[in-house]
Image (cartoon, coloured by chain):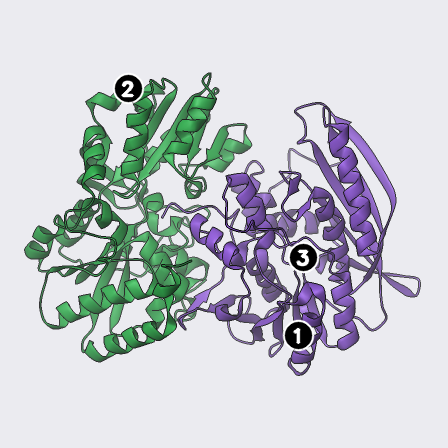
Chain colours: A purple, B green
Amino acid sequence: MIDFDNWVCPLPLRDYPQIVMGHGGGGKLSNDLVEHLFVPAFHNPMLSSLADGAALAVGGQRLAFSTDSYVVRPLFFPGGSIADLAINGTVNDLAMLGATPLFLSVGMILEEGLPMNTLGSLVDLLATAARIANVQVVTGDTKVVDKGHGDQIYINTSGVGLIPAGIDIAPQNARPGDQILISGTIGDHGMAIMSVREGLEFESPIRSDSAPLNGLVAAMLQCSTNIHVLRDPTRGGVASSLNEIAKSAGVGIALDERQFPVRPEVAAACELLGMDPLYVANEGKLLAIVAPEDADAILETMRQHPLGQDAAIIGEVVSEHRGKVTSRTGIGGTRVVAMQIGEQLPRIC
Amino acid sequence: MKYLTEFRDNDLVQKLLYEIHQITTRPWAMMEVCGGQTHSIIRNGIDQLLPPEIELIHGPGCPVCVTPLETIDKALAIAAQPNVIFCSFGDMLRVPGSDHDLFAVKSQGGDIRIVYSPLDALKVARDNPDKQVVFFGIGFETTAPANAQALVVAKKQGLKNFSMLVSHVLVPPAIEALMQSPTCRVQAFLAAGHVCSVMGYWQYEPLAEKYHVPIVVTGFEPLDVLNGVYHAVLQLEASRHEVENAYSRAVQREGNLPAQKVMQDVFEVCDRTWRGIGMIPQSGWQLNAAYRDMDAAIRFQVGDIHTQESAICRSGEVLQGLIKPHLCPAFGKECTPSKPLGATMVSSEGACAAYYNYGRFIEHEQVAP
């Protein structure tokens, strides 16, 4: 029984007597929740590694296990839907452990009044996405809540996969000298959603990059056994993922902004809204931190895969400024790429 | 991205940097007035590329940061009222008042919406005739014309459910207040290009003359900022003190006359408190008599809210370049980016936040927490 009267809120949480949107934004507030509330409560070594999923030893095998919930609005957007995100997101979390994703559960919370046609389309899309990702949906659950108590549909997916023998991929494994690779253009998903929400129109619409990355990861693992870290930079973008890695591995990260692949329309939308693509969500991209001697070969392998055509080396792990991420700017200066505090907000000036 | 990438061209940047290194013979402290310029300087690492003799002091020109605590407390009180839709620029949502921010009000059920223009807030008002729609009208002379225009349109269309919480601030009085301080170290100003595109730069001419200080109208892209620095150094090295326009593609001496007209129709000059700095006489705009019925502070009766700025915060001195952030007694203790006391800790580009968070740890590793 939790003693609510005597429960003492840990310091960083005390500033917020209520949950605010930033607690779900993938930045510092989200991290505070994980670090000061969830990890102490459920304390165990599998959880404490704070990877995208847990790696579990079961019998002689190593299982990967992960879960994620999806609450995006609108439900359908250029390049995908909440259904694609729900399948691909969990598949990707498993793939980031080096696992072969196998089985998924799908839990849905439906709001009273959701058109049956909408649900039908989404289930179709879930099935298609699962087929493309080569995973099976083997269990599920449905709940309906009163109108006004949900936002049409929330989807949770959990998944399990097998980690092949000899694979050890975890954020803590980054070490100085490692090269940092990104599998393609950054910021596509977040700006696709923003453009729809804000009614921004560009010559070519920005499409979400939602995609299952297990195929790409398999190809990379075939190419090299020196992949130290994999991470899909979703909420909070590349900046937040790399900050987390720098912190948990106790290393510095030095990026080169000139190497970031960014679509012109995404760059323009970011410019217009005063946002930085480094902090914008991706749903079909991965960061790989790899041993320097294998970096070129892995890059080549990525570029030959349909989901890695725009892959690039964007920086390296360094022994200076531990726990921090810096970036060399377009004009040769240096800036610090900080952990985002809450949600990224459009700037007034 | 045309008209942007040209002003980030690395070759041209390197040439201009070379020129600046060539002409700089002595230490100079100059202030970039606008938060947008500070953002560009930090974002591009411009300060590290300049000669070590040139010190850039980040000015008070982030409208979000200088909005006084009292105004934010008023905004929070209005936004928490039932039947109100409170519209604001996005980055204002995170700025804390006395003990919470607009995000917290939203989490307690307040209807708070991010808009990109006051005209969007007008649309919200038209679409929700049974609600009171309030726009948080903050900013320098840059955002003021659109805010004034929104009020003119609302009046013309008879939109009874629209009002504005106004806390506009003005640049020239702030420059004057800085220069009047006997300890001020600023030797030149890079004036904010977008403010000048509205107001022109004739207002700065008496200031340059009176305080013997060069004022260079400066833009925001790396080449613009460097061009401003270049012209300021040229003047300093030659002991000149003139107003110069290094942003002529956007700025004319007299400014944008139709924009000035609409602002005159709506606003009148008033004294204004700046967060962490204190009251600067005649440094703000409020609604004039003709528009006072659309003043949200009056409509929602929050005039009684009086909040004192922090007594221990020394951001005024930080802004003048008198002390480094970590020498303030509140730094990192009572004052952090999630509980800022002064303007310089509110914005991620503010000198204090930059020190605390990340910013300058490369040069200042020994002082960062």
Residue type, mark 2 in image: Asp
- Label 2: which secondary element: helix
Q: Position of residue B174 (x, y in %)?
A: 20, 47
The outermost residue toward the front is A203
Residue type, mark 1 in image: Leu
Q: Position of residue A43 (x, y in %)?
A: 74, 53
Relative depth, front residue between B96 and A274:
A274
Relative depth, front residue between B21 and A313:
A313
- Label 3: which secondary element: loop
Give the residue number, with chain letter if any, for mark 1: A299
Residue B185 in view (yes/no): no
Residue A296 in view (yes/no): yes
Give the residue number, with chain letter if any, for mark 2: B293
The CA distance from mark 2 to mark 3 is 52 Å
Give the residue number, with chain letter if any, for mark 3: A284
Q: Position of residue B338 (x, y in %)?
A: 46, 47
Q: Residue at x 69, y 51 (%)?
A: A39
Residue type, mark 3 in image: Gly
